Amino acid sequence: WKVDLVLVSAIVGIYLIVEGLPAELILFGLNCIYGILGIISVKQVWGGLASGSVVGLALLFPIAAAIEETGVLDVAIGVMLGNPQSFIVAFFRMLIPVALLSAFLSNTAIVTMMIPVIVSWSRTLGVHPGKLLMPLSFAAQLGGSCTLIGSSHCLVARESVDK
């Protein structure tokens, strides 16, 4: 019965998330239900919240949101990137700031913020956007893997290594 309950509740949970309910609410609720029914232990129910990597990620979100809302990052990126006149100049002007920023901020936020700039650049330079968008993604991944806080994967891996 436990396997059936988990499968059905997972399907219902996915449906509710797709319908717009907050994923964290659904997942936390299912976690509690599984703990109450004895499908997982109480230690497992609360184990994720006691994880240093989860706490670290939780602390990064408000910091990233504050930086994004103030617009400081938009101004800084505008100054760093400038107005390149050739593809090669645009390529390197994009790589270095993106890698540096993604080492300390969310890769997803950096890439999302840079996409409109990169598409505009590609139109100005007469280059297909993909020639700059793929390197944008790679630069963000590279920068994110340089520090523990740059990527959630690094935080989780560090905690796993300590055990």
Image: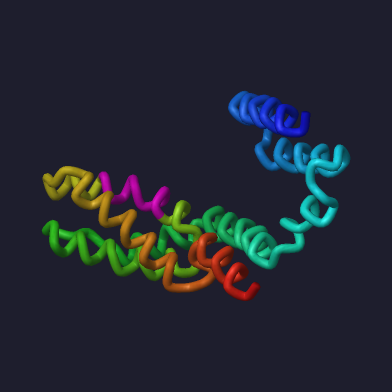
Q: Residue furthest bottom?
A: 162
* Rendering quarter of residue 30: top right
Q: Residue at x 42, y 72 (%)?
A: 146
Q: Residue at x 26, y 45 (%)?
A: 119
Q: Residue furthest right?
A: 36
Q: Which residues are magenta?
A: 111-119
Main SS class of the magenta portion in the image: helix
**The C terminus lies in quadrant:** bottom right
**The N terminus lies in quadrant:** top right
137 or 159: nearer the viewer:
159
Q: Residue at x 34, y 47 (%)?
A: 115
Horizontal side of 30 relative to 108 (left or right) equals right
The image position of residue 158, as x and y in percent, is: 57, 71
Q: Residue at x 43, y 67 (%)?
A: 145
* Rendering quarter of residue 123: top left
* Residue 44 is inside the magenta segment: no
14 or 20: nearer the viewer:
14
- Classify 132 as above or below 151: above
The total of numbered circles placed on residues is: 0
The image position of residue 88, as x and y in percent, is: 13, 62
- Classify 118 as above or below 84: above
* Residue 115 is inside the magenta segment: yes
Q: Residue furthest front?
A: 1
Horizontal side of 61 relative to 82 (left or right) equals right
The way the protein has been coloured in the rendering is: rainbow
The image position of residue 125, as x and y in percent, is: 13, 49
